[in-house]
Amino acid sequence: MDSVRAKVLVIGPKRCGKTRIADFLAGHSAAAAPSFEVYNPTKGARILEFEQVAASGRKNMKMSVQLWDCSGDRQYENCWPAILRDAVGVVLVYDPTIKEQEKDIELWYKTYTSRLGLKDSQVLLFAHQGGAASFRQYQAPRALDHFSFLNTTLDSEEQTAAMKTVFGNFLGAVGAAALEKSAVDIDAFGR
């Protein structure tokens, strides 16, 4: 089984649930995840590390994932060149119930994600809603509708199961890209 390291960024506007999603994706218990009732903004970035087996084509790979939960506050813009370095996947998160965030997430993509030169399969878009009571289906913003897209909430077992499946598929694509990149880097180093 191949083994690969992957740096994945979780980015988007302020107050859209990035930290709660990052905790969930990294396997932290829901009880330990922050509540939407108490807002504690992320300062700069938080790095969560976990291992997961992901499928890429017909084979599995053991992945060591660094999930970077990045602040949505523009005051940390100076940190972005370092944060972007070596990223092989991006999870874009926004709250579709806040109209301005649809434009904001497009700006986040144009300003940061597009610089990485990632394939569409290395970008995942979550339209995250804080509560299951008012959960509804939204469409992806037109400029981003070519990426894998999922309406999410962490307050529904059905939605969390869908998130795990979609994220697992995403990690398979990210892992394959990371393996490809490391092979190219090794080849370039050997010359």
Image (cartoon, grey):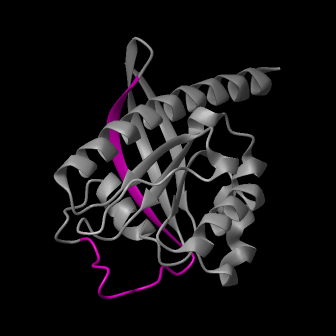
Answer with left or right where residue 99 lies relative to residue 56.
right
Taking depth in this image into account, of 9 and 158 the one nearest to the observer is 158
Q: How far across and down, in percent of the image, does residue 162 sit?
A: 30, 42
Q: Is residue 30 above or below residue 75?
A: above
Q: Is residue 34 above or below residue 167?
A: below
Taking depth in this image into account, of 64 and 189 the one nearest to the observer is 64
Q: Can residue 114 be seen in this view?
A: yes
Q: How far across and down, in percent of the image, does residue 110 sit?
A: 76, 56
Residue furthest out toward the top: 58
The verdict on residue 34 being magenta is: yes
Q: Give the range drawn in magenta.
A: 33-55
Question: At x 57% / y 72%, what residue is drawn?
Answer: 99
Answer with left or right where residue 154 lies relative to residue 73.
left
Quarter holding the C terminus is: top right
Question: At x 34% / y 70%, what residue is drawn?
Answer: 130
The verdict on residue 56 being magenta is: no
Answer with left or right where residue 21 lies relative to residue 15.
left
Q: How far across and down, in percent of the image, does residue 47 sit?
A: 46, 63
Question: At x 22% / y 63%, what residue is drawn?
Answer: 155
Residue furthest out toward the right: 191
Q: In this view, does 98 lie above or below 29?
A: below
Q: Can residue 86 be seen in this view?
A: no
Total of numbered circles in the picture? 0
Q: Is residue 17 above or below residue 158?
A: below
Quarter holding the N terminus is: top left
Q: How far across and down, in percent of the image, does residue 137 sit?
A: 40, 53
Q: Quadrant of residue 36?
A: bottom left
Q: Quadrant of residue 58?
A: top left
